[in-house]
Image (cartoon, rainbow, N blue to C red):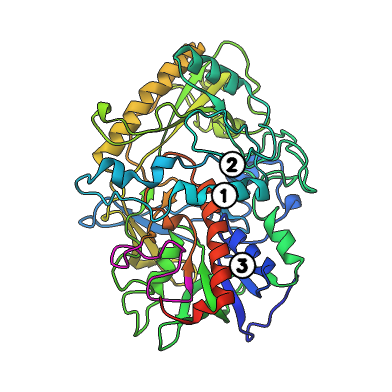
Amino acid sequence: MAKFNTRTEVDFVVVGVGAAGGIVASELASAGFRVVALEQGPYMHEKDFPFDELFYHNDELGITNTRRWPSTFRRTDQEKAVQADTVNYTRCVGGGTATYTGSSTRHHVNDFIEGSLWGSIAGTGLRDWPITYAELETYYVKAEWELGFSGLGGANPFEGPRSKPYPMPPLPIKSSGVLFERGAKKLGLHPFPMPLAILSQPYRGRRACIHCGFCSGFGCTVGARSSPAYSDIPVAEKTGRLEVRPNSYVREISTDKNGRVTGAVYFDERKREVFQRAKAVVLSANAYESPRLLLLSKSTRFPDGLANSNGMVGKYLMFGGGGSAEGIFEQPLNDYKSVRVTRLVEDFYASDPKRGFYGGGQIDGRWGSGGPLAYALGGALAPGSPRWGAGFKDALENFNHTMTSNIFSTSLPLETNNVTLDPELKDAWGVPAIRVTYKEHPDDLKTKAFLRERQLEILEAAGARTKWAGPVREARSGHYLGGCCMGNDPKTSVVDKFHRAHGVPNLFVVDGSNFVTIARNHPTCTIQALAYRASEHIVRMAKSGDLKTSH
């Protein structure tokens, strides 16, 4: 692996080594550039992830420690923000892809043109993306094949055109998938295998899933989860041009008097301040941290934050809508084994004017408890279940008889939903904490209520003897997107269609913060496709000398 002197100017600094940053850093190094990738968390490997539910529950790895990284939350800017665990994500090389479910559906064709389809919705920033599904399709293919996805192309009747099948067949169907499929088909719906960023068979020297059950929320002990940490990064490190620096907490992107970025200032694992010089910077820290870093990077040239001359940094934050429903079945399911989810439907994905509101989403069937500890702590216990004594013990007997249905729904872009810097609270490094302001649009709540009823119908048709769903609530976190939206107009967006910051020729932002609308599904596959596309254009610009001039 490469080891660059901090006084040496490298070609690129990439901030954040997760779903997007891991790909961008690897692609740039593979194209011949010297790259330093800064990750605030540790660099862990298969051996570092134990089969121990209590270990993860107590966050023994320290990768989701909200005491070190506190944040505040408020619903409107008229409220006083209070400390909350809103900003909660996995901090390590690989980011969320080190511990996530692996669900990897693509956006649909219409997800990129909702402004044209729906027109203006009062009080929202609903508009088209500056790119189309057709422009991104080849990069979806690249993500599926480079990272290693398992799925069945063509099984989803609502999917956009596909130029190539998945490289591997789907993971085996689980009991929850069988029951979900049975119920969905009874209702005339179209269930299909969940595409997963998990290897169903050996692939490019990596081991296949061993169906251990320690999956979503746990690190993979065999490297079968298709994270850039297992696929792209090891290959790029062998070039001798990529150095991944873990435990490096960036506090500022530095600039010169001409407004060009010159590198990144970060705290190393001993909290010593270090400056890494670079010809260009790619910010891939996620939809919370990328806006925060831009806002922290103030200068005479950028008094309101880097790339924020138009005041758009941090605005249009979107949380993916969610909600779960549970069903208890007579027969034991043994669903705690293997991956989390194997079947879903997208029959209610598209917005339908007949519903009287904007929105739609996915519904899946899955193992929802995580493990016996999570179940016992109330993750999927039936309402009214005793929490102590003989009644509690009886309720725990349903552990192996319970399945979950999850929804992933729309979230309208509102300018009032944003990421800013808290004026009072500081993190463990003395850096201003993130302040989240978020209140859902009424249509988002109506969408969740609509999908909640569809979940209960599917569980009923599947044969659940008992079923329930919690009340519809406003989101406080979830799949977080937006904040550095892409667009052609420098007045209303932070980056252009190639992820280059407006007015800063050698700064790029490549992550979920670029989303213009949220779609209705797991965003990671689209984040990764965008990362491959952005990398290709950054390489082209760097080799042509375009990064040295304004745009």
Q: Secondary structure at mark 2?
A: loop
Please report the bounds of the magenta region as a residue range.
Answer: 488-507
Residue 21 position by quadrant:
bottom right
441 vs 264: above or below: above
Any mark on residue 163, and which?
Answer: 2
Any mark on residue 247, and which?
Answer: 3
Any mark on residue 267, and which?
Answer: none
Disc 1/disc 3 C-alpha distance (Å): 34 Å
Q: Residue at x 34, y 85 (%)?
A: 300
Q: Are marks 1 and 3 in contact (CB under 8 Å)?
A: no
Determine crowd level at label 1: few under 14, some 14-19, many 20+ residues with C-alpha closer than 10 A.
some
Disc nearer the start of the sequence (1/3):
1
Q: Residue at x 39, y 61 (%)?
A: 484
Q: Nearer the viewer, residue 245 or 422?
A: 245
Q: Amino acid at mark 2?
A: Ser
Q: Amino acid at mark 1?
A: Thr
Residue 94 position, x and y percent, is: 62, 55
Q: Secondary structure at mark 3?
A: loop
Q: Residue at x 57, y 49 (%)?
A: 138
Disc 3/disc 2 C-alpha distance (Å): 40 Å
Q: Is residue 489 magenta?
A: yes
322 vs 492: above or below: above
Q: Quadrant of the C terminus?
A: bottom left
Determine crowd level at label 2: few under 14, some 14-19, many 20+ residues with C-alpha closer than 10 A.
few
Q: Residue furthest bottom?
A: 257
Q: Amino acid at mark 3?
A: Asn
Residue 338 position, x and y percent, is: 68, 31
Residue 347 position by quadrant:
top left
Any mark on residue 138, and which?
Answer: 1
Q: Are marks 2 and 1 in contact (CB under 8 Å)?
A: yes
